Image (tube, grey):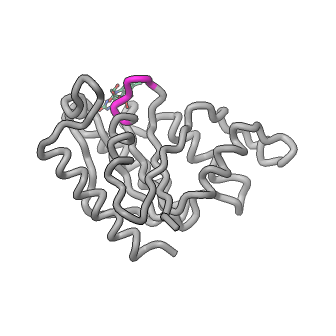
Amino acid sequence: MKKVIGILAGSLRKESFSKKVSRALVGFAPEGFEFRIIDVSNIPIYNQDFDDENQVPQAIARFRSEMAAVEGVIFVTPEYNRSVPGVLKNAIDVGSRPYGKSVWDKKPAAIFSNSPGNLSAFGANHHLRQSLVFLNMPAMQQPEVYISHVSDLFDDEGNMKDGTTKDFIKKAVESYIEWYSKNAL
Ligand code: FNR
């Protein structure tokens, strides 16, 4: 049976670069692995009342059960105001509750941050790492994946262009898989 790795993109935008990176990653899954995009677009804003199983919105129940089926996670995050976009933070919060039933616990993670600018969403990458510590998700340390100038990475059809950045991303995926195999619990 294939190991399933969830890919979560932190953007709702139709032409999102994070979504394009996520779609490209699906094609980089090695044999024995499935990289599965998990849609976070319809998850309601977390409300602690949803911890009552009689009050869980359907979209949240669906997200939690989709996440329960994955064994590792690659977060593809842009940066909003030097931090993690709300849509991704909300997905993290929703998945972390009810207390003791987190969908994130012990799942090996990698963070691929990206920006059209120079700084490659470093701030979002590291804020996300802080949450992963609390969520008990081991996070790949090296290589750190900071993708700058992501707007130059795709052709008009949304395909990742060949070149050093694509090679780096493919190598980072290989490193994640190798590291995952040692860290999966
Ligand atoms: C941004 N952007 C941005 N970029 C960056 O490198 N650092 C930042 O702190 C911010 N802050 C920020 C805040 C808000 C509210 C928006 C809308 C945008 C620009 C951002 O990187 C750019 O819009 C990306 O294209 C967003 O990612 P997606 O949607 O392409 O995946």
Q: For residue 91, what is the image quadrant?
A: top right
* Residue 140 vs residue 126, the one in the foreground: 140
The residue drawn where x is 37% and y is 24% is: 15
Q: Is residue 101 left or right of 11 when viewed as pictured?
A: right
Residue segment shown in magenta: 13-18
The residue drawn where x is 27% and y is 56% is: 144
Q: Position of residue 148 (x, y in %)?
A: 21, 38
Query: Among all residues in the image, which is located at the extreme left?
Result: 164
Q: Is residue 58 magenta?
A: no
The residue drawn where x is 28% and y is 62% is: 174
Q: Position of residue 48 (x, y in %)?
A: 74, 43
Q: Is residue 28 left or right of 49 when viewed as pictured?
A: left
Q: Magenta segment, principal secondary structure? A: loop
Quadrant of picture, ligand 1? top left
Total labels drawn: 0
Q: Position of residue 66 (x, y in %)?
A: 62, 50
Q: Position of residue 156 (x, y in %)?
A: 24, 23
On screen, residue 63 above or below 105:
above
The residue drawn where x is 45% and y is 48% is: 7
